[in-house]
Image: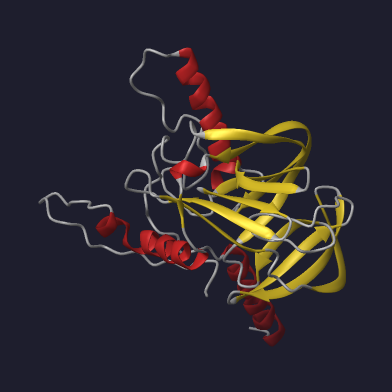
Amino acid sequence: MNRRIIILILALAAVCGGVMAQQKQGKAFRPRFTQYGAANVTEIGRSKIRILYAFQAQDLKDEDTWIDCGQLLTDKGMTQYSSFFVSENNAFIRKWQKDNPNKSYYPGSAKLKGRMKDYWSEYQYSQIYVQGKELTEWAVMPSPEFTQYHYTEPWPLMQWTLESEKQTICGYQCQRAICHWRGRDYVAWFTSAIPLKSGPWKFGGLPGLIMKVYDTKYVYTWEAVAVENGAFPIYQPEERYYKKSTREKVWKMQGEWNRRFNELSGMLDFNFRPKTQRYPYDPLELE
């Protein structure tokens, strides 16, 4: 075979392998409706803009291939990032309970979507709030009941280097930036046309909104798929349902639940013996 053809095939394989790389996600089952705060929230603002992000999409045009759809909202200098899939499901259940006050059950996953809809991911069942130079994560673990925590840390912690390369995302011209943060190298594409120094999950600190961000091994990816105008409510969990903790402790617990869900949840096999199977897990934050 021609040497040039061999080199081209190897190069294409490397690129495709990088794009298709996926997080080693644990197999923890998603929490119950009451656990992730659908009923115990307070409206704290209204956002005039909503940015939707595909999280780890295999096909941007097919929501069923995403792990999650994230939403970024903002009001009076505060931003909130949470799961749009979970938010829509919670809203449906709240309405269903209101319309069916005498029912002793509820359709717990009626509106959940995505290829991991039966499972828990800390990136889907956590809410990130940024106010000034402080970030707060409200984290829900998969089991048992009411294992919910919150902590704060300084924000932003990423030190970006701006580059000249440009591309268009969702109709917005975006500029490339790179950084190394908590064990991974990241590429971000931001637009100064939307003057929010924020982005999906904990990402931010650039002179404009982050529309796309991924680590250079393509294990974790977010990409904006819609920018919408309207009046979108911003909800915050009630603090009394969340235990105060630290980022280090929550990060460690999230890793343990991903790897050891069977053990920590007390699952039994068909012979009523504890399940001890563990799962490989590749966290976003490596340190």
The residue lying toward the viewer, choosing from 6 and 47, is 47
Q: Residue furthest left?
A: 271
Identified at 72% across, 46% down, the residue is 225
Dividing the picture into quarters, in which one does residue 203 lie? Answer: bottom right
The residue lying toward the viewer, choosing from 190 and 3, is 190
The percent position of residue 73, horizontal first and vertical second, equals 71, 43
Placement of 83 over or under 254, stated as above or below: above
Placement of 103 over or under 265, stated as above or below: above
Image-based side of 189 in relation to 84, left or right: right
The percent position of residue 244, horizontal first and vertical second, equals 47, 55
Color scheme of the displayed model: secondary structure
The residue lying toward the viewer, choosing from 215 and 21, is 215
Question: In the picture, which quadrant includes the N terminus?
Answer: bottom right
Image-based side of 38 in relation to 172, left or right: left
Image-based side of 82 in relation to 159, left or right: left
Placement of 100 over or under 254, stated as above or below: above
